[in-house]
Amino acid sequence: MYLVLLGPPGAGKGTQAVKLAERLSITHVASGDLFRENIGRGTPLGRRAKAYVDQGALVPDDLTVAMVMERLHQPDCRDGALLDGFPRTMAQAQALDQELVGDGKRLAGVLYIKAPDQVLLTRLAGRLTCSNCQATYHQTFHPPRVAGRCDRCGGRVYQREDDTWETARRRLQVYFSQTMPLIEYYRHAGLLVEVNGDQGAESVQEELVVKVNALEAAPFSEAQDA
Ligand code: ADP
Ligand code: AMP
């Protein structure tokens, strides 16, 4: 099953994706994590992406699409993947469609997690990320059990450079101008499923599970056939 998690930065995509991918036994593919790994390792891709990521801008489509497609061609994505943070532009969405169709596959649904802007900014400005496994925490809503250390792997927990108020605000603007058009694109394709992200993380997960189960049970829609 191939699913996309769509939504503004801070909506809770990464938080939800880890658990949902585990439940569905599919691979979690987060474009932001892939960029941060490449930046951390100092790869040529990481060096090209760094300035965009630091400024809260989108990395150009050609680099992003090539990176995500390469990841999707790995064996652990053969039977499905939960895409988080990709696609973020129309060009990326079209590239994904083409790639899946070319491989005889299709998207089962696009889970659109929504939350008010003020909630997003508060979440982003308080987010803490593990430098080792990329698990996320929040200074107030979900602090690590031991300050500064990841509950999962013991790695160092830090504040991402792009999680300052100023850069978070810029990332929201980028989302409004470049990513929001995807909502209508996927609605038109009969794939969009809306989820309320402005509730406790466990409630969001429950809503997601119910809606994914409904997708699995639903017959292929006419809009998708078109
Ligand atoms: P995204 O991947 O959409 O950018 P994250 O999953 O990283 O968002 O969540 C952003 C921040 O908000 C993190 O610090 C996370 O711990 C916190 N968070 C996520 N979901 C919730 C929620 N439902 N309620 C409160 N805080 C949340
Ligand atoms: P995220 O971890 O999803 O918040 O992404 C962090 C940063 O990585 C973004 O602000 C962008 O600079 C870059 N990035 C992640 N995914 C994409 C994408 N699909 N297209 C372009 N840039 C991306």
Image (cartoon, grey):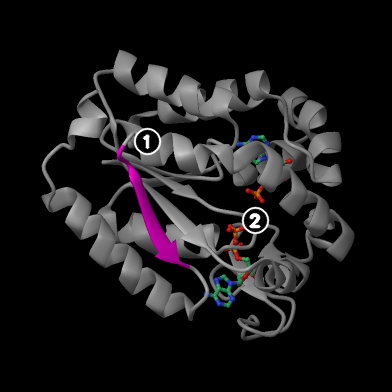
Q: Nearer the viewer, residue 135 or 180?
A: 180
Q: Nearer the viewer, residue 40 or 78?
A: 78
Q: Which secondary structure lies at badge 2?
A: loop
Residue at figure coordinates x 18%, y 57% from the top left: 214
Answer whether residue 156 is visible to the viewer in this image: no
Depicted 153 relative to depicted 3: above or below:
below
Dividing the picture into quadrants, the one containing residue 142 is bottom right
Instruction: Work out which quarter of the rendered image holds the N terminus and state it.
Output: top left
CB under 8 Å between callouts 1 and 2? no
Please tell me in which quadrant of the rendered image residue 155 appears. bottom right
The magenta stretch is 190-196
Q: Nearer the viewer, residue 51 or 217?
A: 217
- Across and down, in percent, residue 94 comes to 47, 22
Using residue 122 as the reference point, say whether residue 216 is left or right of it. left
Amino acid of disc 2 = Pro
- Residue 38 in sight from this viewpoint: yes
Quadrant, the C terminus: top left
Q: Give the residue at x 62% y 86%.
A: 145
Please state if 49 lies on the left or on the right of 202 as rendered.
right
Most prominent secondary structure in the magenta stretch? strand
Q: Position of residue 181 (x, y in %)?
A: 56, 38
Q: Nearer the viewer, mark 1 or mark 2?
A: 1
The residue that mark 1 highlights is 188
Position of residue 209 in the picture relative to residue 63 (left or right): left
- Figure label count: 2
Instruction: Name which quarter of the figure residue 124 lies in.
Output: bottom right
- Name the residue carrying label 2: 9
